[in-house]
């Protein structure tokens, strides 16, 4: 994990951040010009976040096409926010960004969501295979009359699949009907895999070898069949939302789900998360 000392040593100011983006996107200050094809040096422009070719004066903008383009915020604050996200176990609240970066709350809120989107894009989505667990959970809203789980009012449905020993894939879905869930499993699970679920009727008829456990009858493990791994992911997601964000609206929940999908998929190498984010623009 990158310490604050290491972060500040590598990125002490805006210039170091811009040079890093120039290196990652264009090959550095000594590179081949994409316009004239000549190899030479690019020089820093004084009034823009840009560099100019020594031969043809072509300008390149390292932030173009990224979430930092046209922002008035110092690049160092963006990099600091990404460092905070990757060194925090349960995410970062916008209020914390507001305090640490000395920005307004609306600015901190927008920064946080841009970084979550960047995490999702960096993570990508790859087919799951082998032994896969599929499950759904319900987040947000208030329970009425003690009703819990499926059918509880005011909740947003999140569906997830987890490859045992591998990655997780999760997304917000409108409902748990068969025509919603089965196409997601079909598109994202490799053929020949074994899929484990609970007893929800929507999972019936899937084109995979299918094992189930009956939670309604108090059954949580039967032989090697269970969905305990994906339920562990749900527990961490909900704990982080309650502990860090208190409440997340259904409108923006998908960004938080993708953030924690990214975190889970890098659980064995958290020390690389910051370097990966600042390299993938």
Image (tube, grey):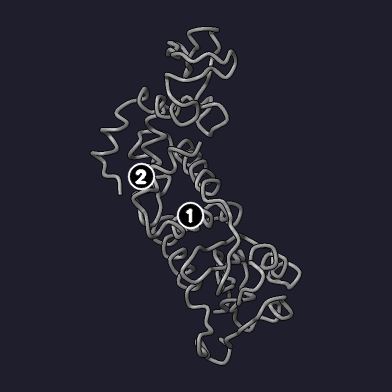
Identify whether 165 is placed above or below 66.
below
Q: Quadrant of residue 242?
A: bottom left
Image height check: is 217 above or below 53? below
Q: Is residue 250 left or right of residue 84?
A: right
> Who's the residue at 49% across and 68% down the image?
234
Circle 2 packing at 10 Å, graded few (<14), some (14-19), many (20+), is some
Answer above or below: position of 253 versus 185. Answer: above
Q: Nearer the viewer, mark 2 or mark 1?
A: 1
Q: Measuring from the top left, give residue 274's x and y in whole percent.
A: 38, 44
Q: Nearer the viewer, residue 260 or 148?
A: 260
Quarter residue 213 falls in:
bottom right
Asked if residue 201 shows in the view, the reply is: yes
Q: Give me the residue at 69% from left, 63% from top.
A: 187
Q: Which mark is residue 93?
A: none
* Picture residue at 68% right of the left edge, 64% below the top: 184
How many badges with numbers are in the image?
A: 2
> Separation of disc 2 and disc 1 at Cα?
15 Å
Depth check: give the residue in front, 168 or 101.
168
Residue farthest toward the right in the current orientation of the protein: 179
Residue ID for mark 2: 84
At label 1, counting other C-alpha atoms closer than 10 Å, the crowd grade (few under 14, some 14-19, many 20 or more) is: many
Image location of residue 183, percent across then percent down: 72, 66
Kindly give the residue lying farthest to the left in the view shown: 5
Q: Position of residue 211 (x, y in %)?
A: 61, 84
Per the image, label 2 sits on a secondary structure element best described as helix
Check disc 1 and report its element: helix, strand or loop.
Answer: helix
Q: Are marks 2 and 1 in contact (CB under 8 Å)?
A: no
118 is higher (above) or lower (below) than 21? below
Q: Reading the chain from its start, which is encountered first: label 2 or label 1?
A: 2
Percent coordinates x, y for residue 164 in the rendering:
49, 71
Would residue 155 be visible to someone looking at this image? Answer: no
Residue on which disc 1 sits? 262
């Amino acid at each position: 994990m990158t310490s604050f000392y290491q972060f500040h040593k590598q990125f002490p100011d805006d210039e170091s951040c811009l040079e890093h983006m120039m290196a990652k996107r264009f090959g550095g200050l000594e590179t081949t010009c994409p316009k004239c094809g000549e190899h030479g040096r690019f020089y820093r422009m004084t009034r823009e976040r840009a560099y100019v070719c020594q031969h043809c004066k072509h300008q390149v903008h390292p932030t173009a096409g990224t979430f930092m383009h046209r922002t008035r915020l110092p690049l160092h604050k963006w990099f600091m926010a990404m460092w905070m996200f990757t060194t925090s176990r349960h995410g970062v609240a916008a209020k914390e960004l507001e305090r640490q970066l000395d920005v307004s709350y609306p600015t901190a809120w927008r920064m946080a969501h841009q970084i979550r989107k960047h995490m999702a894009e960096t993570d990508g989505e790859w087919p799951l295979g082998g032994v896969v667990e599929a499950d759904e959970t319900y987040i947000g809203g208030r329970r009425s009359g003690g009703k819990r789980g499926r059918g509880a009012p005011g909740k947003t449905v999140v569906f997830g699949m987890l490859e045992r020993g591998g990655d997780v894939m999760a997304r917000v879905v409108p409902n748990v009907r068969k025509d919603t869930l089965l196409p997601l499993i079909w598109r994202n699970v490799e053929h020949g895999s074994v899929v484990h679920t609970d007893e929800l009727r929507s999972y019936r008829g899937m084109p995979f070898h299918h094992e189930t456990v009956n939670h309604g009858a108090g059954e949580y493990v039967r032989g090697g069949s269970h969905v305990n791994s994906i339920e562990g992911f749900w527990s961490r997601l909900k704990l982080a939302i309650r502990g860090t964000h208190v409440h997340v609206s259904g409108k923006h929940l998908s960004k938080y789900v993708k953030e924690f999908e990214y975190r889970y998929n890098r659980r064995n190498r958290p020390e690389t998360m910051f370097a990966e984010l600042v390299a993938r623009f």
